[in-house]
Image (cartoon, rainbow, N blue to C red):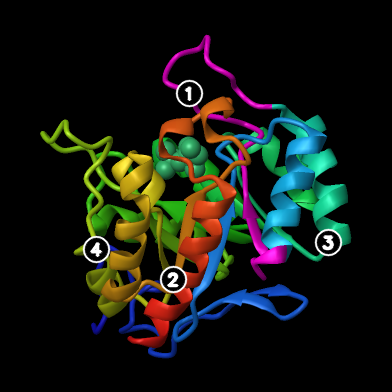
């Protein structure tokens, strides 16, 4: 009787101790630590991957984001390099000791992606793809679920419950902004969600300021606000030359901006 019907296993009423996501090689995401995940919106080429990894190594960042299957509003936009891109990425990331966070869009991709992925990302457009969530519940890899475009906090927790109740407890929640009436920013980053999710769930919570505000010059402020709101990590987009990025360049940091932000994230976390 202590559990709600809406979700229970992801609730703090079920498990008090915060869940640590162990990605191996001493890399993980957990309460009381500050994960930094960066990389391009889209994986574009071998050269691009090498440049991002070199930037990450210089700044002691160990988790890399990037899409190879991209959910694009227009079917004519760049939709990703697919499995070929993921395999190129994997070779370099593995050699560099860097973990791969990438979006899986449909059930049929899980098996082919499995051996090349450290964290399966469920994108905002798929947060309520319940068949996908069911299948990810059977996988022995971490899953990061983004909040739905118009999703409530409760719905995000229910989506997490699908995966968790399927048997996969390696789950990360991600606030990436929601669609509101506000048009001055791409989305409305709901930082309220951070302390609320942390109070309701034992799962780690990370913030995505890139998609959250969608405006490059304001990404750092919102990242640091996310840290102070209590996030366990920040995920943001970076690229050697954001204006040339195949997707989301308008919200992507260059490497100098990224290096500065990573340092500021760590300093801000130390103040918490
Ligand atoms: C992304 O991470 O590039 C992405 C497509 O994110 P979202 O699903 O939050 O829009
Ligand atoms: Mn993006």
Q: CA distance from mark 1 to mark 3?
A: 30 Å
> Residue 164 at what x, y percent from top left?
50, 65
The quarter in which the C terminus is drawn is: bottom left
Instruction: Give the mark nearer the N terminus: 1 vs 3.
Output: 1
From the image, tell me which residue sits under label 2.
265
**Alpha carbon separation for disc pair 3 and 2:** 23 Å
Among numbered discs 3 and 4, the one appearing first in the sequence: 3
Q: Quadrant of residue 217?
A: top left
Viewer-side residue, 36 vs 243? 243
Residue 139: which disc? none
- Callout 3 touching callout 4 (CB < 8 Å): no
Q: Is residue 26 above or below residue 252?
A: below
Q: Image height check: is 270 above or below 99?
A: below
Q: Residue drawn 57% across and 69% down?
A: 170
Q: Mark 2 to mark 1: distance in Å? A: 29 Å
Find residue 193 and name its label: 4
Q: Residue furthest front?
A: 256
Dominant secondary structure (helix, strand or loop) of the stretch shown in magenta? loop
Specify which label sits upstream in the sequence, 2 or 1: 1
Circle 3 residue: 96
Q: Secondary structure at mark 2?
A: helix
Label 3 environment density (alpha carbons within 10 Å; few <14, some 14–19, many ≥20): some
* Count of labels in the image: 4
Q: Residues within 10 Å of mark 2 (few under 14, many from 20)?
A: many
Instruction: Tell me where residue 265 sits by quadrant.
Output: bottom left
């Amino acid at each position: 009787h202590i559990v709600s019907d809406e979700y229970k296993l992801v609730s703090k009423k079920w498990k008090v101790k915060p869940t640590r996501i162990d990605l191996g090689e001493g890399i993980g995401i957990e309460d009381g630590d500050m994960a930094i995940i960066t990389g391009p919106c889209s994986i574009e080429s071998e050269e691009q991957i090498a440049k991002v990894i070199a930037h990450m190594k210089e700044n002691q960042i160990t988790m890399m984001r990037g899409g190879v299957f991209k959910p694009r509003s227009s079917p004519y936009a760049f939709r990703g390099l697919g499995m070929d891109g993921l395999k190129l990425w994997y070779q370099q990331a593995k050699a560099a000791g860097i973990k791969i966070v990438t979006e899986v869009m449909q059930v049929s991709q899980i098996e082919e992606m499995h051996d090349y992925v450290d964290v399966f990302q469920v994108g905002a457009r798929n947060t309520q793809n319940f068949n996908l969530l069911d299948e990810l519940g059977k996988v022995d890899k971490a899953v990061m679920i983004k909040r739905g475009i118009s999703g409530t906090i409760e719905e995000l927790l229910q989506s997490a419950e699908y995966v968790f109740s399927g048997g996969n407890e390696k789950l990360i929640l991600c606030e990436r902004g929601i669609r509101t009436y506000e048009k001055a920013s791409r989305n409305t980053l709901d930082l309220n969600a951070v302390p609320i999710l942390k109070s309701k769930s034992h799962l780690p919570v990370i913030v995505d300021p890139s998609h959250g505000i969608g405006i490059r010059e304001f990404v750092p402020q919102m990242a640091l606000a996310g840290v102070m709101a209590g996030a366990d990590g920040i995920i943001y987009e970076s690229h050697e030359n954001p204006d040339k990025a195949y997707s989301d360049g308008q919200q992507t940091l260059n490497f100098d901006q990224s290096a500065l932000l990573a340092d500021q994230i760590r300093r801000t976390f130390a103040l918490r």
